[in-house]
Image (cartoon, coloured by chain):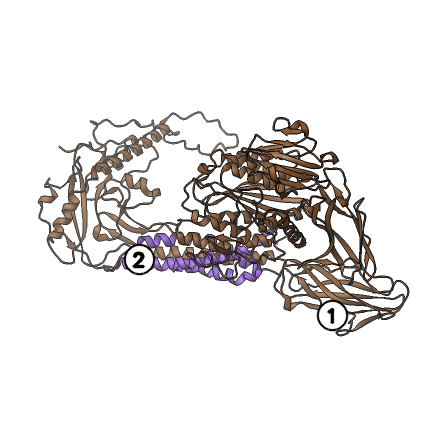
Chain colours: A brown, B purple
């Protein structure tokens, strides 16, 4: 805040100076001529940054670079990469003791942070600048130009970094705003949001109370350099929005002949100003950046005289010229001509970027004073800048005494050139006190200034014993003599403590620092001492505002709940504490607040110091302390878990429970069921058991029997198909499904509906069938597992069960239903898949049996086993004296074995439980399900 | 209803997020939490997501299942899918609200 205020005082002064000394830059000015690069507000913005840099040793620069698709056309040569890299180099070389950090973000349809905050120094500037350039080159150009996302992203990056001094944003774009679907309303609304005012009639008004993000940037003292690359030869559908960039960045600007105002306007003095720049081509963009570099480093724009002449006075340390042509020449007062080829050898610094050149003179001396002449084919567009090289330095003063004559001494220095006396300049040396509301110029009682040496001393009588104050000395309205060349103003700040003379009582310490205020029930405590005058006289300390400290800043909104207490009670409002000679009074102060917050609190008490003679002087007693809001970790955990359980777990459980409860097979009324034995041919065609095609049978109530009405259920048993089940998975968002589980020893095939992935393998094998939730739409075939063992070219016996719902009783409905069954084309595939799955399963079984029938390996006898313990079984080839049975697959012509030992035959494998003799009284003999198990398939009857 | 609740909750989440800053948590750990003064907004957001959104989802499931029995009922599976996504997104938003409520209520 302090920096901002001082910046503003300087900015105002310098702006006035620049306006009077330069060709007047008007609103909407473009980078077409030497004097109109910046508007008046833009000049203030540059001054704001310069002033900040003068009193800070840190700069954070954020590069916000347009990567929209149009950049491929407007900057085909990727000039911006080198320009931005050079600008970083220039920022890093502004001052040796300046710490510069930078970060980069791109924007098109969205914002993308590209390079995080990185500190650069003399050793790393070149690699970092190259890195910046490479990153810019590598960024693909595509998409629109979402200003809102861009600036919000940059602001987020600036907020994320701990502020350490000055901050600036270099925002480069080449087109008007384009947000989201790029509709006029969307764009206009976004513009209004950014502006903080309804400046575009097509858009919605911004939120109440919002001044827009640019105003927020200005409020935070962040200088935004908005650079618009405006190539008129490139078609731009967003051109109608381009003029809004200036009012966004600078707070006001001309849009189609109307002055548009954004954010808080006029921009408050404590805010930083923005700088809008416009370039008409990539070459022009290079010029803009080169000129901007001079301005930020302390240059002041001036105009060439007739025929390219310009004066140089003693007070000019260096000059710079930015030119677009390479055929320039410079003639010095002594007639020496400098050209592009020999400039470097003559001490000039030549910076070339994107076809533009910046020529900076070496430090100028007495021999260089006179009239110089600049010749160039681009002289109409070339720009001249002067730099004084002046700098202010203040001495650390001793403590100031309120009401006494105090001295603040310092000197004017000159960097980069030999010292010349201040008589080389016209200027105004001023003193100001920095307050939270701005810089207040104070009338120094006397100023001692030695123009020869630059040494000066302000004599200043502080009226109040106000403790720590910040004083600012500044050199304003600087012009060189005798030509009146305008030069940049300079300033410096110094903190001083204002205390009292010996005949006044004092308070110590200043400020009064209390202990931390922890939580809502904590108390911050501390003491201060009222000391009698040091000269041995009596005195008094009065509190004209009462013992109610006023809170100046606080992290929380709890101004009404502060509770202060003092011990001893110092009396009521206006009462004084009398201090006898040589005495002191220790005062304890305690403060609490039922509202806890994290942050620092500063408060003050108004104090009046009184001498024994009745002389008084006022002052303040600053009080500071830290407040914390401790978190009960256990309570936090419990509340969080409870809320998560209530808000997330419970709804999820409820969701699952609702799904489970309402997922049921719909049985309903008018449900009919037909069941008949059928044959499924190798081609998948279903016929009746006597070979009649289903379509040839007249279907009706003879076959379809009414099912008794029953409520919907999650489970139904069908005597021939198996069990119908309605299922839900564990995922509460998952899809429910309905499945048919066949009876034991059977498979079910038919039209398959949804099954979760974990069950699809079973579905393929025919051990499960996904069906529809409405039973009226279900039909399926139940096939004995053993029936699949036969040759694939023979029909398979099966039981067909068909459900139908026929509320109207029309006979055609049965015919249609069975026609649909007969025309189902997926049976061949399903049968083949079921057979393959069964064969694979059988092969696995065979392999297992073979493994078991291998001769047992010699097992070492474990010493720990008791001799009478029975040996362990090692499978079919165990220690049984009976030789292992045949373990190879049976041949087709082998006679069938009777299973279950009904014929007195041996079991198929030693130790294997006997198989069931048959599936039921009406079932044909089963084929063995495990051909490797020693059984053989039953012979078919021919 | 679900979309409105989700939208409002998102707005509240963004609103509270703008007041967020690193706050001392436990020991020397600092975590970003919204300003305590926005606690009512977090509670409102918590009521909107997940509770209202989940209620809408359950309501939708209920209505669509019961609608299976009504031949005049037109099923709207898109509603269910949209609500499922909203509920999933609402869970993420809810976590932010939950953390802020817990922080607001656990201050000593």
Say which of A73 and A615 sits in front. Answer: A73
**Whole-percent x and y of residue A126?**
61, 33
**Whole-percent x and y of residue A199?**
47, 57
Q: Secondary structure at mark 1?
A: loop
Say which of A891 and A615 sits in front. Answer: A615
Q: Tell me if I can see residue A874 in this picture.
A: yes
Q: Identify residue for label 1.
A: A547
**Whole-percent x and y of residue A206?**
48, 58
Identify the residue at horizontal 74%, vertical 67% (top origin).
A606
Say which of A792 and A693 sits in front. Answer: A693
Point out the residue furthest to the right here. A536
- Tell me the quadrant of the picture where the N terminus of chain A can be found: bottom right
- Tell me the quadrant of the picture where the C terminus of chain A can be found: top left
How dense is the environment of label 1, judged by Cα within 10 Å: few (below 14), some, or many (20 and up)?
many
Q: Please, is residue A201 above or below residue A617 in the view?
A: above
Residue B64: numbered disc: 2
Q: Please, is residue A459 above or below residue A819 in the view?
A: below
Tell me how many marks there are. Answer: 2
Say which of A597 and A321 sits in front. Answer: A321
**Whole-percent x and y of residue A395?**
79, 48
Say whether residue B97 is left or right of residue A708. Answer: right
What is the chain identity of the residue bearing mark 2? Answer: B
Residue A294 lies in quadrant: top right
Residue A690 lies in quadrant: top left
Say whether residue A527 is left or right of residue A259. Answer: right
């Amino acid at each position: 805040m302090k920096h901002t205020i001082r910046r503003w005082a300087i900015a105002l002064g310098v702006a006035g100076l620049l306006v009077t000394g330069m060709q007047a830059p008007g609103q909407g000015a473009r980078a077409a001529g030497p004097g109109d690069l910046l508007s008046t507000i833009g000049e203030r913005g540059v001054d704001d940054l310069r002033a900040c840099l003068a009193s800070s040793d840190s700069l954070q620069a954020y590069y916000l670079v347009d990567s929209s698709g149009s950049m491929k056309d407007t900057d085909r040569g990727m000039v911006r990469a080198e320009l931005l890299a050079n600008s970083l180099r220039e920022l890093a070389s502004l001052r040796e003791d300046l710490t510069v950090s930078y970060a980069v973000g791109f924007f098109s349809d969205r914002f993308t942070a590209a390079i995080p905050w990185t500190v650069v120094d003399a050793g790393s500037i070149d690699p970092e600048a190259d890195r910046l350039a490479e990153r810019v080159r590598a960024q693909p150009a595509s998409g629109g130009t979402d200003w809102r996302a861009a600036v919000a992203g940059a602001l987020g990056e600036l907020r994320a970094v701990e502020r350490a001094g000055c901050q600036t944003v270099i925002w480069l774009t080449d087109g008007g705003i384009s947000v989201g679907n790029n509709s006029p309303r969307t764009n206009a609304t976004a513009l209004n949001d950014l502006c903080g005012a309804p400046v575009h009639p097509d858009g919605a008004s911004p939120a109440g109370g919002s001044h827009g993000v640019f105003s927020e940037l200005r409020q935070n003292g962040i200088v935004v350099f908005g650079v618009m690359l405006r190539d008129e030869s490139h078609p731009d559908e967003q051109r109608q929005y381009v003029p809004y960039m200036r009012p966004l960045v600078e707070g006001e600007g001309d849009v189609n002949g109307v002055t548009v105002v954004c954010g808080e306007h006029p921009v408050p003095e404590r805010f930083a100003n923005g700088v809008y720049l416009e370039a008409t081509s990539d070459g022009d963009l290079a010029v803009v950046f080169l000129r901007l570099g001079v301005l930020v480093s302390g240059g002041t724009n001036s105009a060439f005289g007739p025929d390219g002449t310009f004066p140089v006075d003693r007070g000019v340390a260096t000059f710079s010229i930015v030119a677009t042509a390479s055929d320039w020449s410079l003639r010095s007062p002594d007639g020496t001509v400098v050209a592009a080829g020999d400039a470097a050898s003559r001490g000039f610094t030549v910076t070339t970027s994107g076809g533009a050149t910046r020529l900076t003179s070496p430090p100028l001396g007495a021999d260089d004073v006179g009239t110089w002449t600049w010749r160039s084919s681009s002289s109409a567009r070339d720009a001249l800048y002067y730099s004084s090289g002046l700098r202010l330095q203040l001495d650390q003063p001793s403590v100031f005494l309120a009401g006494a004559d105090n001295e603040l001494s310092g000197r004017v220095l000159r960097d980069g050139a030999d010292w010349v006396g201040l008589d080389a300049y016209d200027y105004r040396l001023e003193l100001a006190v920095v307050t939270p509301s701005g810089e207040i110029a104070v009338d120094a009682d006397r100023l001692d200034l030695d123009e020869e040496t630059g040494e000066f001393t302000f004599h200043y009588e502080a009226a109040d014993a106000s403790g720590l104050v910040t004083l600012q000395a500044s050199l304003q309205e600087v012009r060189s003599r005798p030509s009146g060349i305008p030069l940049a103003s300079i300033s410096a700040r110094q903190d001083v403590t204002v205390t009292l003379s010996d005949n006044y009582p004092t308070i110590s310490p200043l400020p009064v620092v209390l202990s931390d205020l922890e939580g809502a029930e904590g108390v911050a405590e501390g003491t201060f001492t009222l000391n009698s005058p040091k000269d041995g006289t009596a005195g008094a300390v009065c509190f004209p505002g009462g013992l109610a400290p006023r809170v100046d800043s606080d992290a929380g909104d709890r101004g009404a709940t502060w509770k202060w207490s003092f011990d001893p009670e110092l009396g009521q409002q206006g009462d004084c504490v009398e201090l006898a000679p040589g005495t002191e009074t220790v005062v304890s102060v305690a403060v609490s607040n039922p509202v806890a917050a994290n942050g620092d609190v500063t408060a003050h008490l108004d104090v009046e110091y009184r001498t024994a003679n009745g002389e008084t002087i006022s002052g303040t007693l600053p009080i500071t302390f830290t407040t914390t809001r401790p978190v009960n970790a256990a309570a936090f955990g419990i509340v969080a878990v409870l809320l998560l359980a209530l808000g997330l777990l419970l709804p999820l459980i409820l969701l699952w429970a609702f799904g489970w409860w309402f997922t049921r097979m719909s049985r309903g009324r008018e449900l009919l069921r037909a069941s008949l034995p059928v044959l499924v041919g190798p081609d998948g065609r279903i016929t009746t058991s006597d070979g009649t095609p289903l379509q040839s049978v007249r279907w009706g109530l003879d076959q379809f029997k009414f099912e008794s009405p029953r409520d919907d259920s999650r489970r139904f048993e069908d005597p021939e198909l198996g069990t119908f089940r309605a299922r839900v998975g564990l995922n509460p968002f998952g899809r429910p499904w309905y499945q048919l589980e066949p009876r034991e020893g059977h498979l079910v095939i038919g039209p398959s509906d949804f099954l979760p992935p974990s069950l699809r393998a079973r579905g393929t094998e025919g051990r499960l069938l996904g069906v529809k939730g409405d039973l009226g739409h279900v039909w399926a075939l139940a096939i004995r597992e053993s029936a699949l063992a036969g040759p694939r070219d023979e029909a398979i016996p099966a039981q067909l069960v068909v459900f139908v719902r026929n509320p109207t009783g029309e006979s055609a409905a049965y015919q249609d239903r069975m026609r649909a069954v007969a025309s189902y084309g997926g049976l061949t595939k399903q049968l083949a898949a079921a057979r393959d799955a069964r064969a694979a399963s059988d092969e696995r079984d065979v392999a297992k049996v073979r493994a078991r029938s291998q001769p047992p390996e010699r097992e070492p006898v474990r010493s720990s086993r008791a001799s009478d313990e029975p040996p362990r079984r090692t499978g079919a080839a165990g220690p049984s004296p009976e030789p292992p049975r045949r373990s190879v697959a049976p041949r087709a012509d082998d006679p069938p074995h009777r299973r279950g030992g009904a014929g007195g035959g041996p079991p198929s494998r030693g130790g294997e439980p006997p198989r069931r003799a048959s599936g039921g009284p009406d079932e044909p003999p089963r084929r063995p399900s495990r051909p490797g198990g020693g059984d053989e398939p039953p012979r078919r009857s021919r | 209803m679900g979309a409105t609740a989700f939208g409002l909750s998102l707005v509240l989440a963004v609103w509270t997020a703008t007041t967020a800053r690193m706050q001392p948590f436990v020991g020397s750990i600092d975590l970003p939490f919204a300003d305590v003064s926005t606690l009512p907004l977090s509670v409102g957001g918590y009521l909107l997501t997940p509770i209202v959104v989940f209620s809408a989802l359950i309501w939708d499931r209920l209505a669509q299942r019961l609608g299976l029995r009504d031949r005049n009922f037109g099923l709207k599976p898109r509603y269910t899918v949209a609500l499922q996504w909203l509920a999933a997104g609402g869970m993420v938003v809810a976590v932010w609200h939950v953390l802020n409520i817990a922080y607001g209520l656990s201050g000593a």
